[in-house]
Image (cartoon, helix red, strand yellow):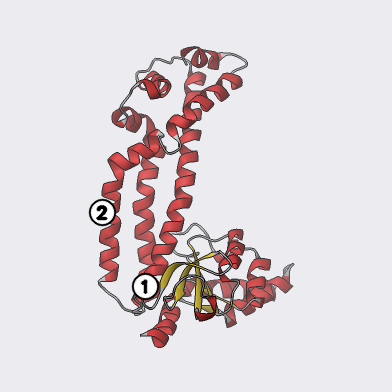
């Protein structure tokens, strides 16, 4: 590793940089990598306690009243807790690695790199920058994958929160992770029934925390009989996406398939206004814009409206 670091000062520095990245990748990323171990041993207990407290506080106020605002606040609180650890790792990985990793023969190469930076053993500014670049790339790659997993978990938790606010009970009036006769999984169904009984399902509910063109993936979850609901948390404080980030042909297709879109009420109204302005100004692609606007006008619900609809049916 020392010779590779030394060669980062050469004109052909990219080759040793790639070699260092290849060596360090399994030591930082993956199931036995430094980031996962540090999260499990140092950060996860505190994070899980915070998330539990947020959930218990939300569940203690079971009601559909002001549900859009409450879900928006819940999403933001979850986002802040989940991103705090990743932000710390992004900005302070040298200190966190040096303080929390138990160095041994299995991670010797990572120890050499971290100590070289921490102990100011590198005088060449370019070499130091290249080493930081390698570590940063690997840390950010791990964090990016982590964010995707956390988004999936957050989406399901917020979906559950909406159903519980409506008075539904898991494994009674709703079921999570239902497996259809076609083998696809649906995030939630109502009422709760055994898998592979599609004809007895009344509502199929797919959830995405932040939706872009991945919204087309819910087709496999909702491509069955019954009422089809697609919950997206686009527009919430904790989401990085807006409804406009979903391709118009995808939303137009969902309209034709009689999906019902469930989203933050204020964001739905803002998107309708935005589309109206675009259509009024005769901007290109007005046909798809009109289809999406019609979808939002006729087949969309806010969180509170959706919860009340379920409450009237099942409670």
Mark found first going from the N terminus, 2 or 1: 2
Which of 142 and 279 lies nearest the eye of the viewer?
142
Q: Nearer the viewer, mark 2 or mark 1?
A: 1
Determine whether 44 is above or below 14 in the image. Answer: below
Q: Secondary structure at mark 1?
A: loop
Residue found at x 59% / y 83%:
298
Determine whether 247 is above or below 28 in the image. Answer: below
Asked if the residue at tag 1 contacts the one at tag 2, i.e. Cβ–Cβ closer than 8 Å, the answer is no
Q: Is residue 39 visible?
A: yes
Q: Quadrant of the C terminus?
A: bottom left
Percent position (x, y) of residue 75? 39, 62
Q: Is residue 237 visible?
A: no
Q: Which residue is mark 2?
A: 49
Are there few (<14), some (14-19), or many (20+) residues within 10 Å of tag 2? few
Residue found at x 27% / y 59%:
52
Residue found at x 51% / y 23%:
20
Is 257 positioned to the left or the right of 83 in the image? right
Q: Quadrant of residue 295?
A: bottom right
Percent position (x, y) of residue 135? 46, 30
Determine whether 8 is above or below 293 in the image. Answer: above
Residue found at x 34% / y 75%:
169
Is 192 positioned to the left or the right of 183 in the image? left
Q: CA distance from mark 2 to mark 1?
A: 25 Å
Q: Which residue is mark 1?
A: 171
Determine whether 181 is above or below 90 in the image. Answer: below
């Amino acid at each position: 590793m020392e010779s590779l670091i030394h060669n980062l000062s050469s004109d052909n520095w990219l080759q040793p940089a790639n070699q260092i990245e290849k060596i360090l990748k399994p030591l930082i990323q993956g199931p036995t990598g430094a980031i996962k171990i540090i999260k499990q041993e140092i950060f996860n207990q505190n994070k899980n306690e915070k998330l539990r407290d947020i959930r218990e506080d939300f569940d203690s106020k079971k009601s559909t009243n002001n549900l859009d605002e409450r879900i928006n606040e819940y999403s933001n609180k979850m986002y802040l807790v989940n991103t705090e650890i990743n932000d710390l790792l992004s900005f302070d990985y040298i200190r966190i690695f040096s303080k929390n990793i138990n160095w041994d023969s299995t991670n010797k190469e990572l120890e050499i790199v971290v100590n070289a930076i921490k102990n100011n053993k590198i005088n060449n500014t370019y070499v130091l920058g290249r080493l930081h670049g390698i570590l940063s790339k690997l840390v950010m790659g791990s964090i990016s994958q982590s964010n995707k997993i956390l988004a999936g978990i957050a989406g399901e938790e917020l979906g559950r929160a909406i159903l519980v606010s409506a008075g539904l009970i898991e494994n009674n009036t709703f079921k999570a992770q239902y497996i259809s006769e076609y083998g696809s999984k649906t995030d939630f169904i109502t009422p709760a029934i055994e898998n592979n009984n599609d004809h007895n399902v009344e509502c199929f509910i797919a959830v995405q925390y932040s939706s872009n063109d991945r919204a087309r993936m819910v087709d496999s979850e909702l491509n069955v009989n019954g009422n089809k609901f697609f919950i997206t948390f686009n527009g919430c404080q904790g989401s990085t996406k807006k409804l406009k980030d979903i391709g118009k042909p995808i939303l137009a297709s969902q309209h034709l398939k009689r999906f019902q879109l469930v989203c933050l009420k204020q964001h739905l109204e803002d998107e309708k206004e935005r589309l109206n302005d675009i259509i009024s100004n005769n901007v290109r692609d007005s046909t798809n814009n009109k289809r999406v606007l019609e979808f939002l006008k006729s087949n969309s619900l806010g969180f509170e409206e959706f919860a009340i609809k379920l409450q009237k049916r099942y409670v």
